[in-house]
Image (cartoon, rainbow, N blue to C red):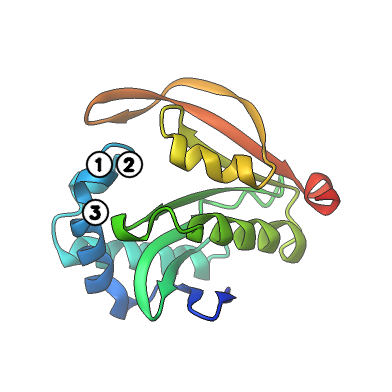
Amino acid sequence: MFAFTLDEHVELRPLAIEHARALFELTDRSRDRLRKWLPWVDAVREVNDSLNYIKGSLKQAADNGGFSAGIWVREELAGTISYHEIDWNNRSVGIGYWLGERYTGQGLMTSACRAFTEHALMRMGLNRVEIRCATANQRSRAIPERLGFVLEGVIREAEKLPQGYVNHAVYGMLQSEWRRL
């Protein structure tokens, strides 16, 4: 299972059942900011909702279909990063991520995405990693841009959020491109 040390204080580790309360509390503390960009936030109303997410992630990992990791800063959960369902036939995967409000602006997610991209392309042997972000979410879009992902296009009204439909910017990175970087 994936585990990666980003620096002396930050580590990526798979989420486990015992992390449900910490995940719920982090989500709840960041709810107002997250709601603007993530459609699932309002459905997370109690610890059991976070527990069910973790159980689903563990099943997905057991089925070799992807996994979610917690981003741990000084042993405190700061956010999550996930491989969406891995397409083994086409050797591609999407990455999703979010951080608790007090952890933004520190480069944590750029480092986490770099590690997840490296792992997918170089260790898992996938050919393509994709990141999709709402076009207006400049902070999220800055991450794949910093890492050298290519903006491949925009999908109109790709996701329904509480404030209405948002367009998605689609970024891609190929294994051959990553090797050159």
- Which residue reaches farthest top? 156
**Which comes sooner in the sequence, label 2 or label 3?**
3
Q: Secondary structure at mark 1?
A: helix
Name the disc covering residue 30, or none. Answer: 3
**Disc 2 from disc 3: Cα separation:** 11 Å
Marks 1/2 in contact by CB < 8 Å: the verdict is yes
**Residue, disc 2:** 38
Residues packed near mark 2 inside 10 Å, few (<14), some (14 to 19) or many (20 plus): some
Which percent across, then down, holds residue 177? 81, 45
Residues packed near mark 1 inside 10 Å, few (<14), some (14 to 19) or many (20 plus): some
Residue 47 quadrant: bottom left
Marks 3/1 in contact by CB < 8 Å: the verdict is no
Left or right of 25, for residue 53: right
Name the disc covering residue 35, or none. Answer: 1
**Which comes sooner in the sequence, label 3 or label 1?**
3
Number of labels in the image equals 3
| Amino acid type, label 1 | Arg
Establish if 166 lies above or below 90: above
**Disc 1 from disc 2: Cα separation:** 5 Å
Q: Residue at x 41, y 34 (%)?
A: 137
**Disc 3 from disc 1: Cα separation:** 8 Å
| Amino acid type, label 2 | Leu
Left or right of 121, for residue 141: left
